[in-house]
């Protein structure tokens, strides 16, 4: 039986929950930027959380080096985007849950290191629900289990409004990571929850991410039915 951590008694903020299926990267990226810009223009708008999966895609951070790609970026069959988050190259695919919190850090802590550690804490607590010990590594961003990187974290913050977030490898096909040096870390491998829990339930982990994130950031998730709908054309599969 899965037992959630003790709930935080004081809820400070409300957060619109967009609990989506599989969405192509470019559409989700445009949507994220729109959500962020809305809150930059009007800081009173409540926070948002987008949780989804992506079809196979590679993304580079703002300053990512192309040397960590093992394929020619100019003539490739693989989808590749350079985006405004921090960090090196990473890979997204089905079976990996991606969380994009759009938060106004003026209501939390105006400290990017604090925010990165809180995102890691969400992952660590979710893993603990499955008796997995998630660990941080000094000087690196993300979460590891038994030396294998199981979650990547990368953010962009403008006027203290966040976008991008973290990606947790639940039960993906990890072969796509073989075409890159994930996050530019040459001496550490990538892993997934399924390697430790073969029958891991993706939908259960999705709900746990929502629950734990609401507790770590002390936000009240609004009923998805009350959240404004994402345009249907951006949703590939529920």
Image (spheres, grey):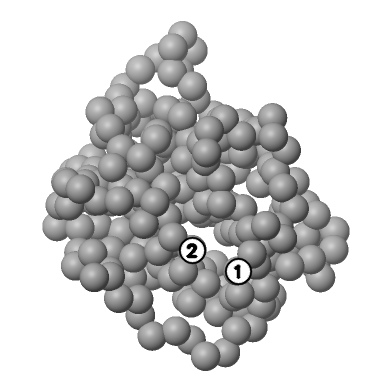
Spot occupied by residue 189 in the image (x, y as percentages of width and height): 20, 43
> Against 183, is 49 above or below?
below
User: Crowding near pointer 2: few (<14 within 10 Å), some, many (20+)?
Assistant: some
Spot occupied by residue 124 in the image (x, y as percentages of width and height): 32, 67
Q: Is residue 63 left or right of residue 159?
A: left
SS at mark 2 in the image: helix
On the image, which quarter does residue 176 sit in? top left
Q: Residue at x 49, y 21 (%)?
A: 79
Residue 107 visible in rendering: yes
Find disc 2 in the rendering and name its residue.
210
The numbered mark at residue 79 is none
Cα gap from disc 2 to disc 1, whole angstroms: 8 Å
Q: Is residue 65 left or right of residue 175?
A: right
208 and 173: which is toward the camera: 208
On the image, which quarter does residue 125 sit in? bottom left
140 and 151: which is toward the camera: 151
Q: Residue at x 64, y 83 (%)?
A: 12
Answer whether labels 2 and 1 touch (C-beta < 8 Å).
yes
Q: Residue at x 28, y 32 (%)?
A: 173
Find disc 1 in the rendering and name its residue.
221
> Against 59, is 132 above or below?
below
């Amino acid at each position: 039986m899965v037992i959630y951590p003790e709930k935080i008694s004081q809820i400070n903020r409300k957060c619109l929950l967009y609990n989506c299926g599989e969405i192509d990267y470019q559409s989700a990226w445009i949507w994220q930027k729109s959500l962020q810009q809305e809150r930059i223009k009007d800081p009173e708008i409540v926070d948002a959380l987008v949780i989804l999966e992506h079809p196979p895609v590679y993304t580079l951070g703002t300053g990512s080096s192309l040397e960590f790609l093992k394929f020619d970026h100019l003539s490739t069959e693989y989808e590749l985007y350079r985006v405004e988050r921090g960090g090196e190259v990473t890979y997204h695919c089905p079976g990996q849950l991606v969380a994009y919190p759009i938060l106004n850090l003026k209501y939390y802590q105006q400290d990017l290191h604090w925010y990165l550690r809180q995102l890691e804490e969400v992952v660590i607590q979710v893993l603990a629900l499955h008796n997995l010990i998630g660990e941080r590594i000094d000087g690196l961003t993300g979460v590891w289990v038994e030396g294998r990187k199981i979650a990547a974290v990368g953010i962009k913050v403008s006027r203290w409004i966040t976008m991008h977030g973290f990606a947790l490898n639940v039960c993906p096909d990890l072969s796509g990571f073989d075409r890159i040096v994930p996050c530019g870390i040459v001496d550490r491998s990538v892993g997934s929850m399924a390697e430790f829990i073969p029958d891991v339930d993706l939908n259960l982990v999705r709900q746990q991410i929502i629950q734990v994130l609401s507790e770590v950031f002390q936000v009240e998730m609004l009923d998805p039915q009350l959240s404004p709908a994402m345009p249907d054309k951006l949703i590939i599969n529920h």
